[in-house]
Image (tube, grey):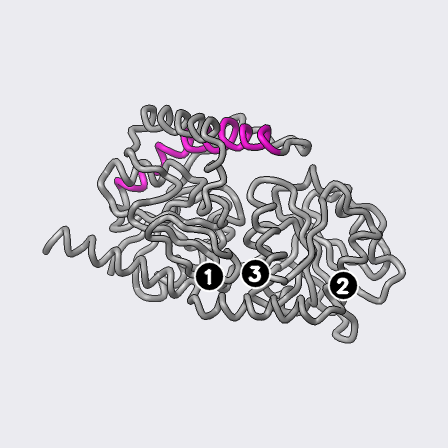
Amino acid sequence: MARFLFVVPPLVGHVNPAAGVAAELTARGHEVAWAGHAELLWRLAGPDALVFSCALPPDLPARPAELKGPAALRFLWEDFLIPLADAMAPGVAAALDAFAPHVVVADQQALAGGLLAEARGLPWVTSATTSAELIDPLAGMPKVAAWVGSLLDGLRARIGGGAADPRISPHGVLAFTTRELLGTATLPPRVRLVGPSIGTRPSTVDFPWEWLDPLRPTVLVSLGTANTAAGAGFLAAAAEAFAGRSVRAVIADPGGVLGEVPPNVLVRPQVPQLPLLERVDAVVCHAGHNTVCESLWHGLPLVVAPIRDDQPIVAAQVVAAGAGLRLRFGRADAPRIAAAVEEVLTEPAYRRAAQALGASFRAAGGSAAAAGYLEQLALESLAHLGP
């Protein structure tokens, strides 16, 4: 039996894939602990999860909706990733001391995890919940890459971190995608394409399942949990797009930005996404990697409207694979959304491509494949420690 510590940021889309792997390791008899935001982890990983609480920056700002391009990148690093790593570092260090893991699994956006594991000589693996960093988005921007490097150097000095790049572990990277979606991009060494981590999740979300009509197509519309401010206009246009149509829509509206909607549109602050995907016919989303992969796992065609960060990269992968259509987020009015939804619902090629990607995901092994790789790394670590 081995001990595995998962270090994750306070982001649902980054915790969920790790939770699937952690559940698989627990089922195999290993010990699992977490370092991160306690309340979120107990909600997503289960109330019995062993959690070492990490602080959040006291003044962590919400990202302005209008930020895109270089401004969004600057905000991501200066206002989110680096302050988060500084705040999490004491909690991560305490978890390493108290739990003494054989292997650390550190999310790409929980920089303190990889840096502190490296400094202590522990085997650690990167959890890459999106493929954006795998293809080095800064390769053509050497000045930006140097600026990011200087931020990481400062962070290392403050928290006593190791020399490795915390985004790409030399011990291995768990990438929750497959070559069929990723395309032909060259990958760093020791990347394991394990496919999405889809597993049972604890959920207390109430949903009126009787509202769904099996005789009428239903579309899920979701912009994730971090795009409330940016998504108000898009969600309103999406609700309008379904007015007077036979197609039904379920819209996730965590910010409560929608008012009155047509009778064939159901608005909920939260939805039980995985079980709901089993009962819908297509998905409209922001091209968040988790939502895209969970939709494709279920063979569902997509309409993607990327907002920022890795989303344009993921949207391009969906379109290149033939599994969906892309809209420009700022120009996605009701007629454009309606036309795109109509096309992916009525043109069988989109569903066939989505189903083929789903098959590649299942063949890759998902949580079981990731757990198997981590087990092997733990065995090597235990052998190195000796009796």
Q: Where is residue 225 shown, x and y percent of the image?
A: 62, 46
In the foreground, 138 or 330: 138
Q: Give the dominant element type of the magenta stretch: helix, strand or loop.
A: helix
Going 78% across and 51% down the picture, which residue do you hit? Answer: 238
Q: Is residue 232 magenta?
A: no
Tell me: 77 left or right of 65: left
Q: Residue furthest right?
A: 244
Q: Position of residue 108 (x, y in %)?
A: 43, 43
Q: CA distance from mark 2 to mark 3?
A: 21 Å
In the rendered view, would you say 59 is above or below 98?
above
Horizontal side of 155 relative to 100 (left or right) equals right
Residue mark closest to the camera, 3 vs 1: 1
Answer few, some or many: residues within 10 Å of disc 2's Cα (few below 14, many 20 plus, some between 14 and 19): some
Q: Which residue is mark 3?
A: 294
In the rendered image, the vertical position of residue 47 relative to residue 147, given as above or below: below
In the visual, does 65 lie left or right of 141? Answer: right
Q: Is residue 93 magenta?
A: yes
Q: Which callout, 1 or 2, points at the residue further toward the start of the chain?
A: 1
The CA distance from mark 3 to mark 1 is 10 Å
Counting residues from the start of the chain, the first of labels 2 and 3 encountered is 3
Q: Amino acid at mark 2?
A: Glu
Q: What span is in magenta?
A: 69-97
Corner quadrant of residue 340:
bottom right
Residue at (34%, 54%) from the top-left corner? 32
Instruction: In the rendered structure, find residue 343 and report the number of the disc placed on it.
Output: 2
The residue at which mark 1 appears reads as 195
